[in-house]
Image (cartoon, rainbow, N blue to C red):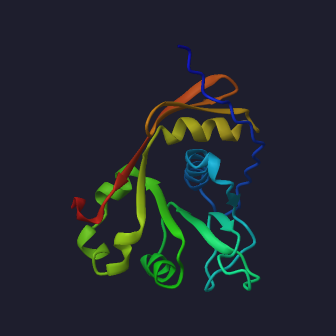
């Protein structure tokens, strides 16, 4: 039996702001690719309680009398203030995911995180990847990306047919300290 994965093609344009690091862009790219079937918007012109997401999916309202869409998925990439995550959990029913470099999460002071009781509801996903090699490919223009799933949460990232990095996504829990 020959099982062939469906190839999904999307056009994606990423722009680097002056004060934005390549690593932030790469984490956004990888988070977007990891959630490719979620119909995400990248840095939408959307605010919730004064906060803006890196990636967002809006869902139709649950209540037919409600005009505004519901926040279905809110994704933060790289460093984020813990108070922001705490407020998002407090005032929103959305699934909230925080992506960052796996090494960053390993260095985090989990005791400090536990002060924010609601943060146990945040999905923290550490990314293990070769960021410098991926960043070098971004500097050269706008490559065609391929993101191949090898196994659950294990991928390879290609730009213009050249493999840039193996990518691993690792979900962490606050009690992993």
> Looking at the image, which residue sits at the far top?
1
Residue 127 is at least partly visible in this image: yes
Q: Quadrant of the C terminus?
A: bottom left
Residue 116 is at least partly visible in this image: no
- Marks counted in the figure total 0
Write the residue at 65% across / 35% down.
137
Write the residue at 23% across / 59% down.
176
Q: Check the image and report above or below for 12 versus 83.
A: above
Horizontal and vertical percent position of residue 126? 41, 52
The quarter holding residue 163 reads top right
Q: Check the image and report above or below for 2 versus 33.
A: above
Q: Check the image and report above or below for 115 versus 140.
A: below
Q: Is residue 12 left or right of residue 137?
A: right
Pick the front one: 21 or 65:
65
Write the residue at 23% across / 64% down.
175
Q: Is residue 151 left or right of residue 111?
A: right
Pick the front one: 18 or 9:
9
Horizontal and vertical percent position of residue 57? 65, 63
Q: Is residue 19 left or right of residue 109?
A: right
Horizontal and vertical percent position of residue 119? 37, 74
Q: Check the image and report above or below for 97 versus 168.
A: below
> Looking at the image, which residue sits at the far front?
64
Horizontal and vertical percent position of residue 164? 56, 30
Write the residue at 55% across / 46% down.
34
């Amino acid at each position: 039996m020959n099982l062939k994965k469906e190839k999904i093609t999307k056009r994606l344009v990423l722009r680097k702001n002056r004060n934005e690091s390549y690593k932030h862009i790469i984490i956004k790219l990888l988070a977007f690719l990891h959630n490719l079937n979620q119909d995400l918007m990248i840095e939408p012109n959307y605010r919730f309680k004064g906060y803006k997401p890196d990636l967002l999916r809006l869902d139709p309202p649950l209540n037919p009398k409600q005009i505004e869409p519901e926040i279905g998925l809110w994704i933060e990439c790289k460093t984020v203030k813990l108070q922001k995550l705490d407020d998002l959990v407090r005032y929103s029913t959305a699934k909230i995911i925080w992506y960052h470099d796996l090494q960053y999460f390993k260095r985090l002071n989990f005791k400090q995180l536990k002060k924010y009781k609601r943060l146990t509801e945040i999905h923290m996903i550490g990314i293990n990847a070769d960021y410098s090699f991926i960043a070098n490919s971004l500097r050269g223009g706008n490559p065609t990306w391929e993101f191949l799933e090898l196994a659950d949460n294990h991928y390879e990232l290609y730009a213009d047919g050249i493999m840039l990095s193996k990518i691993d996504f690792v979900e962490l829990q606050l009690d992993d300290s």
